[in-house]
Image: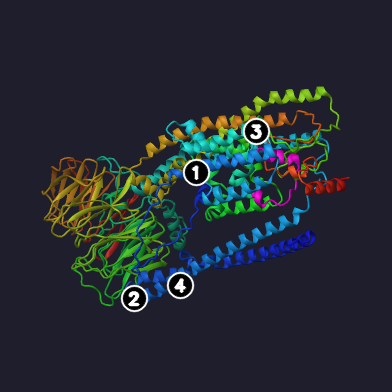
Amino acid sequence: MKRAVSSLIISATAFCANAVNRFPKPDFSSGYEYPTHYYPVPAEPIWGIIDLVVLVSLMGVVAYSVIKRSIRRPVLWITVLSVLYFGFFREGCVCSVGSLQNIAAGVADSSVIVPIGVLLFFVLPILFTLLFGRVFCGGVCPLGAIQELVHIKSFRLSKAISTVLGLIPWFYLGFAVLFAITRSGYLICRYDPFVGIFRLGGDSVIIGFGVVLLILSLFIGRPFCRFICPYGAVLSLFSRVSFKKTEITRHGCINCDLCRNACPVDAILPPYENQIKESRSKGVQRVLLYMVVLPLLMGVGAILLRSASDTLSLVNKRVQLLELVKTGQADTQGIETVELQAFFGKGGTVEDLQKEVELVQSQFKMHSTWVGAFFGLVVGLTLLSLSLKRTRKTYTIDPAACVSCGRCFSYCPQNNLDPTSLVLNTELLKQKS
Amino acid sequence: MNIDPKLLRTIARNVAVITVLFIVIFSTMMAVNYIQTRGSLIHENEVLAQLKALSDQNSENTELFDQIRQLDLMARKAFFVNKNALTSGIVILVVLFVVLVVSLRIYYDGLKDLPDKEIDPIDDWAMKTLARKYVRWAGVGFAVVSLMFIALNMNLYSLLPGGDEKEEIAAVEAITESESAGEAAQAVPEEGVPAAEESIGGEDSVKGDSVGIAEAATATPVEVSKVTHNAFRGNNGSGHSSAKNVPVQWDVTSGKNIAWNVKIPLTGHSSPVINGNHVFITGASNQSRELYCFELSSGKLLWTAKADNIPGSPSAMPKTAHGTGLAASSVSTNGSVVCAIFATGDVMGVDMNGKRLWAKNLGVPDNHYGYASSLLMYGKTLFIQYDNTTAPAVIALDPQTGNERWRKARSGDKIAWGSPIIAQVGGKPQLVLMGLPNMTAYNPSTGEQLWKLECFSGEVGASPTAANGIIFGASEYSSVVAINATDGSLLWKAEDFLPEVSSPVATANHLYVTTSYGMLACYDVKTGKVVKEVETGGEFFSSPMIVEGKIYIMDNSGRMFIFKADAECAQIASFNTGLKGMTTPAFTDGKIVIRTETNLYCVSNPN
């Protein structure tokens, strides 16, 4: 059974990793002379600097447009620019989303060197988020930008469902960090759904996933950003405490309800109207209960993931190799596979590999415990936050969810910036009334 | 120019509808085209594969080569045409998608997103209550999935009563299987200690035998030993057998301890091979080359497979010496397939029911005595030492299909008559070939040459042997050598007693050499000094086998000598079997199968 599970995981990993359809060489000599192999030269350092300049500039423009001017049009053009530059021209790498794995690996292992460019790509969006909210997500991140560009009309999901789906980025974050610090691979990069589209090639399954996300993006705002992106989850933490926050209008909300449907990510919260009466003591009891349950959830999560750590460790290439070695040794009729030939050919011994794998598995055991506790914490805090009543008199933006796209500005009748929008909003108010 | 917004929206809507239709139809067409043409991949082209198989069997047919080249080129062109079509299709789809997005944007541009029907409860608290419920269920779901992973990863044996014992048995079986695959050559016992359990083929051997048993349709089930003798000089050509309760006395004339004695239809000098209840042997005449399968329990001829109608097979038989003939090479099996080769260069694979799976001609070997190297199967590969005057080579084939896995020219080597062995060195198998003038080791998986050492002269007729990472070779008018198999360096060299045809066999401490002038010499494996020499008065072409700590060696007159496999080489028995023979006997539990010039007989221990 264990072998079956191992084989399943290894096969699944190999399937996903097998991006290239191998093409057989001709069996016969045809006189064709193969061209000399050449290797691409390292990227010019100047491009790293240009990337950083572009990143900061674009985030600055988005921040200025959204915070200072409350206008969307520049954000839309930034979106186009980001898709073209960071997406198709720079082929989606370096990206801030993936950089968190480098940082995690660098923090866990001092021998892992994190390039300064990668570090800045990780830090700068966080810094801007602390100052101005998620302006990076607004239009600078190519993954969000491509979804923004194809978005036509928002169909809202039930808040309950989107809350549950909103747990996924945290779980994804946990696994991505776990695999990064155990040197088992960079999940976020490997399964980036849009990088294949930007590079005009790659694994067909992952590109297909990206296409599905884009089709969903037509009518559901940014499904990847909301329900998958782990970096978005990190930024949502910082945006809660950002220095400046996006406002729908600076002229006072009149509770017309026009802005809420305009938000593609469902970040505009309506005024709170408590119609179901619940005694205060019952609400307090629930909060206390969840506060007690929180460490319990963390403990359960830690135990569960620690117990599953051996299975999780099968993602690691060395562990996979040991499984292959064991399978190869047990298969008396088998001849060595390419992997085993390479392993033994390089002078590898099973004993050394076994020791190496034991070390990896012990790392998995330890880190899985922490990640499991983190999962319990996420679930517990989500339950706690859903148990708190907050009074809102007007429509307000949830800073954690808002991606600073600026779609809501033109909907607000208070933002009568030009006669066209005034007429339009008057029309809308009439329709609503 | 002012366009009426309503008209623009209508146009945009119509464009969007038409684009969606195009996208659906185009996607369907592309999907159908992809499904229809995906079989055109070159490595999946059945016709091409069949033609290649034919060309493998008939290497001289240049017309066939041209056909394959043309078909290969067509298949490649078709592949790239399809690939280009797919790429163009994807580009068109992307363009259509962009048109759809733009037209929909124009359509919806005038329609602001008005607040529509609430999908959540109006009350925020009710919505949160619902969300809490969903989150709780999500948490439970995650825990259940984690538990499933944990449960699947647990060794379920440990949950069963007596699970530990079962696990231990499974572990022992796994170790036995892994050892038996390749370590027979290395599993060299100390003197007096029986060799480790061998069961190459394992389940396969039982599977193969079950057919034979069924065919025999005997009333009582036949007990089949798992100890096999899958090639010349046993598994991996080691010269060792783990057979137990092996007879030490018999007489064909009187019938003492003789289970059966049958005449072989055609003559030959190949040695018998045993796998389960099957005994394999070859015979040949100028008219026919045949592989025979006898039933071990009864001596009944179960089937005959003829090496006929093979493309490239010569119509006139090559000239061979009387002592060699056309069927001097022993067969090899893995319990599923048995492969045979003849002096014509014809090689074939036959299943355990006698059904020929494949056959091909490797080219008639240029060999003045006649081709005599035996086959060796290791795992899923058949190895052929094809040393001849014109193009010496070592060839690895897939025994199921006959397809070539790899082939290496043995440049620098000349004609030789030795057979390959598998030696386990540091846990890894080495394919070792003794040729003229080199001893060479290859990686059996890839054919990569691991090391080569020049050490022989004259005519090399014996095969190498291995023990504890040391490769031994010996040849008349040359020397006995011991080679460190990790790097191919010479450990020692001696010239005291040298074999002509008989191959040496080694234990952890001693190397035993039997010569054509009747000597049994015992060398110290560490120093190369002769520690014992025994004169028998016979003439040894057969090779010695070590079974149950005893050396079995039969001289050309049919006299069997049994010595203790130690430094003293004390003679345990010496008797005339009654029939002449030069082949090496095959061993299994309680039985020995011996080929003589005309007969095949089985010695069975009554106990």
Q: Are marks 1 and 2 in contact (CB under 8 Å)?
A: no
For the point 71% across and 65% down, the residue is B18
Q: Are marks 3 and 4 on the same chain?
A: no
The kind of residue on which mark 2 rests is Thr
Q: Element type at marker 4?
A: helix
Q: What chain does mark 1 sit on?
A: A
Q: Is residue B534 above or below residue B22?
A: above
Nearer to the camera, B34 or A247:
A247
Name the spot of residue B525 as percent of width and height, x first: 19, 42
Magenta span: A147-168
Q: Is residue B281 above or below residue B454?
A: below
The kind of residue on which mark 4 rests is Met
Q: Element type at marker 3?
A: helix
| Marks 3, 1: nearer the viewer | 1
Left or right? Give the position of A135 relative to B562: right
- Residue on which the image places disc 4: B74
Q: Are marks 4 and 2 on the same chain?
A: yes
For the point 57% across and 51% down, the residue is A84
| Marks 2, 3: nearer the viewer | 3
Q: Are marks 3 and 1 on the same chain?
A: yes
Say the numbered circle drawn on residue A239.
3
Q: Element type at marker 2?
A: helix
For the point 44% across and 73% down, the residue is B71
Residue B605 drawn in magenta? no
Nearer to the camera, A202 or A248:
A248
Left or right? Give the position of A40 relative to B386: right
CA distance separating discs 1 and 4:
48 Å
Question: Could you tell which of marks 4 and 2 lies nearer the N-terminus?
Answer: 2
Q: How packed is label 3: few (under 14 Cα within 10 Å), some, or many (20 or more)?
A: many
CA distance separating discs 3 and 4:
60 Å
Name the spot of residue A432 as percent of width and height, x first: 86, 46
Nearer to the camera, A195 or B263:
A195
